[in-house]
Image (spheres, helix red, strand yellow):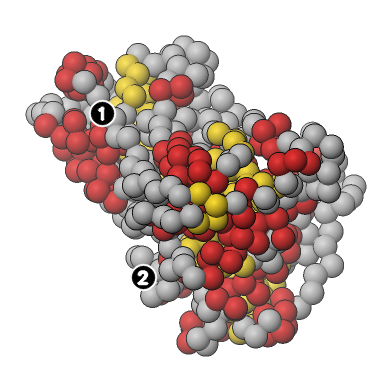
């Protein structure tokens, strides 16, 4: 669309509209008032969060669930520093995201002006690209490059800095066409080599992870696994990449891994690492594979060429997206009687047994029963979000993900992520159930975003699992320094009353039998809801009590 002497702020919004952006997440600031004014007349929905970290995490979650860059606007200085957690999540989770930062006027640079920050230095180690738009006529070019960069190869965050005076100067320029991610695929020779390596395997294993996945790619992985009778595992918080009820599913390689899955990885002679990096958490602190020589035949497929050979020396490195790879290998013929016949079924049986919730944990709320009820009640397209903490084990181990784009969780382990992610998910899919799991410590890092949910009509349900402490740190503390509690106890509010104070629905759950009717009332409330689930502090993990961990620490 041809512009006619528009301000830099209007050109920014024109560029976002041209890219198909439907919503932006922000905390308003005077440094980008011209953008806010242009958004007033735009089709783009403006979601004003309560804190910049929440806004950035919402944008990251939208990028994670859609594959297109989530958009966040913040003001300079404190606003930008507050947004850093969301940028870090996007970087570690390989999520496309663009953070726009209002900036001081161009003529004031270098004087340590009010809230001045050098964002190239600040975000240079986290973002794929950091740049300042120094004149309005370069807005289309720079925004187009930002989208291309965020989407290319291994996706990630981009930071664009907007000087306040640039946003009010005018230019007559044209918005660029929408950016499309560059697809990549293996060569015919690489496809043939994949077939040869698999045919010679005795104990092959597929490990799916990373980003750049689509619903079609996930479906193609199912077909590929079935054709070759391959067990498929997924990496930490990438569980939506394979149907957990599928007979080839072997489980997730993350925190608290099934010991039988650990053995499966160690015993594998050929590993197809598809889309992911196999970083610290899935590799069990880089212990499952040798570095750089893995001790196995490794086929590594990744959309970012810079990740191939970065840690592990692959026998076959393929620079390709998951979908591009799976399309290319679709014509491979599987061995008629593979040496690994039956291994997928055995692995799936081990996963199924591992994912059955425990019957009894300390206290009056049995989270195993809660998870069983949720599994029986929620539809397959329900979206689950969480931040970080021991409570997340109840999702990762006992929820069975069935469909793509139903999980938003931070691979980087950032606390406070669950609620902002749930807001973004519910705005994307208002017709679907969106359930956020949050520990009491995790929730209070971004719990004020419940106000954003109420204001925007994002009728999500938050389960605040309250045990009165930072449970994960307490677990480590009791193991390393048993009985010496320091800095991990929490005095918490009435979270149900907090929900009602915001105008939402709130209830407290103190016994197992109270959960199901409370959840159904929350679903029917027509408002965002918080269920305050009071968990016994002794129920620190699904299979170990606080006392058990303390006693084990004293015996060390």
**473 over 21 or under it: above or below:** above
> Does residue 249 show up?
no
User: Relative to 311, is 364 on the left or the right?
Assistant: right
Tag shown at residue 379: 2
Q: Residue at x 18, y 16 (%)?
A: 189
Residue 488 in percent (x, y) is at 83, 54
In the rendered image, the vertical position of residue 41 relative to residue 204, given as above or below:
below
**Snapshot quadrant of residue 444:** bottom right
Q: Is residue 3 left or right of residue 368?
A: left
The image position of residue 326, as x and y in percent, is 23, 35
Local secondary structure at mark 2: loop
Helix, strand or loop status at disc 1: loop
- Residue 64: image x %, image y %? 46, 50
Please report the residue visible at 35 percent of the width from the left and 48 percent of the height from the top: 178
Residue 317 seen: yes
- The quarter of the rendered structure image containing the N terminus is bottom left
In the rendered image, which residue does mark 1 sit on?
185
Give the x, y percent position of residue 322: 31, 36
* Disc number placed over residue 294 in the picture, else none: none
Lower sequence index among marks 2 and 1? 1
């Amino acid at each position: 669309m041809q512009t006619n002497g528009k301000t830099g702020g209007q050109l920014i919004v024109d560029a976002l509209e041209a890219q198909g952006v439907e919503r932006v997440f922000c905390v308003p600031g005077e440094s980008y008032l011209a953008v806010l004014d242009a958004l007033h007349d735009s089709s783009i929905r403006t979601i004003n969060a309560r804190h910049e970290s929440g806004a950035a995490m919402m944008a990251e979650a939208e990028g994670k669930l859609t594959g297109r860059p989530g958009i966040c606007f913040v003001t300079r200085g404190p606003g930008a520093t507050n947004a850093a957690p969301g940028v870090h999540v996007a970087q570690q989770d390989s999520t496309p995201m663009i953070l726009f930062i209002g900036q001081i006027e161009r003529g004031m640079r270098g004087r340590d002006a009010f809230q001045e920050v050098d964002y190239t230095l600040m975000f240079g180690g986290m973002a794929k690209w950091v740049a300042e738009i120094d004149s309005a006529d370069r807005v289309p070019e720079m925004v187009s490059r930002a989208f291309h960069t965020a989407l290319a190869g291994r996706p990630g965050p981009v930071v664009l800095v907007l000087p306040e005076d640039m946003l009010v100067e005018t230019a007559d320029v044209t918005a660029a066409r929408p950016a499309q991610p560059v697809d990549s695929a293996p060569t015919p020779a690489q496809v043939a080599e994949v077939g040869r390596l698999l045919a010679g395997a005795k104990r092959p294993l597929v490990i799916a992870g990373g980003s750049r996945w689509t619903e079609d790619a996930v479906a193609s992985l199912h077909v590929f696994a079935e054709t070759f009778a391959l067990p498929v595992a997924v990496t930490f918080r990438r569980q939506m990449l394979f149907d957990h009820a599928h007979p080839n599913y072997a489980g997730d390689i993350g925190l608290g891994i099934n010991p039988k899955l650990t053995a499966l990885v160690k015993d594998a002679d050929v590993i197809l690492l598809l889309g992911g990096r196999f970083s610290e958490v899935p590799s069990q602190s880089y212990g499952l594979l040798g570095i750089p020589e893995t001790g196995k035949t490794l086929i590594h497929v990744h959309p970012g060429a810079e990740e191939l050979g970065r840690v592990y020396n692959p026998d076959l490195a393929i620079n390709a997206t998951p979908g591009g790879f799976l399309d290319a290998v679709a014509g491979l013929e599987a061995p008629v009687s593979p040496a690994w016949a039956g291994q997928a079924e055995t692995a799936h049986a081990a996963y199924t047994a591992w994912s059955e919730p425990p019957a009894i944990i300390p206290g009056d709320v049995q989270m195993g029963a809660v998870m069983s009820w949720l599994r029986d009640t929620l539809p397959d397209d329900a979206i689950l979000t969480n931040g970080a903490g021991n409570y997340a084990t109840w999702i990762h181990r006992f929820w069975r993900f069935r469909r793509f784009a139903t999980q938003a969780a931070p691979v980087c382990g950032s606390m406070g992520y669950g609620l902002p992610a749930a807001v973004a998910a519910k705005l994307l899919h208002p017709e679907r159930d969106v359930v956020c799991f949050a520990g009491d410590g995790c929730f209070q890092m971004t719990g004020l975003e419940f106000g954003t949910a109420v204001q925007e009509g994002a009728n999500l349900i938050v389960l605040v699992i309250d045990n009165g402490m930072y449970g994960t740190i307490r677990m480590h503390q009791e193991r390393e320094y048993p009985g010496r509690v320091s800095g991990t106890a929490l005095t918490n509010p009435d979270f149900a009353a907090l929900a009602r104070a915001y105008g939402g629905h709130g209830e407290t759950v103190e016994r197992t039998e109270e959960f199901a009717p409370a959840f159904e009332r929350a679903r029917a409330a027509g408002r965002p809801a918080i269920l305050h689930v009071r968990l016994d502090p002794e129920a620190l993990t699904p299979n170990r009590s606080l006392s058990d961990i303390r006693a084990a620490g004293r015996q060390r």
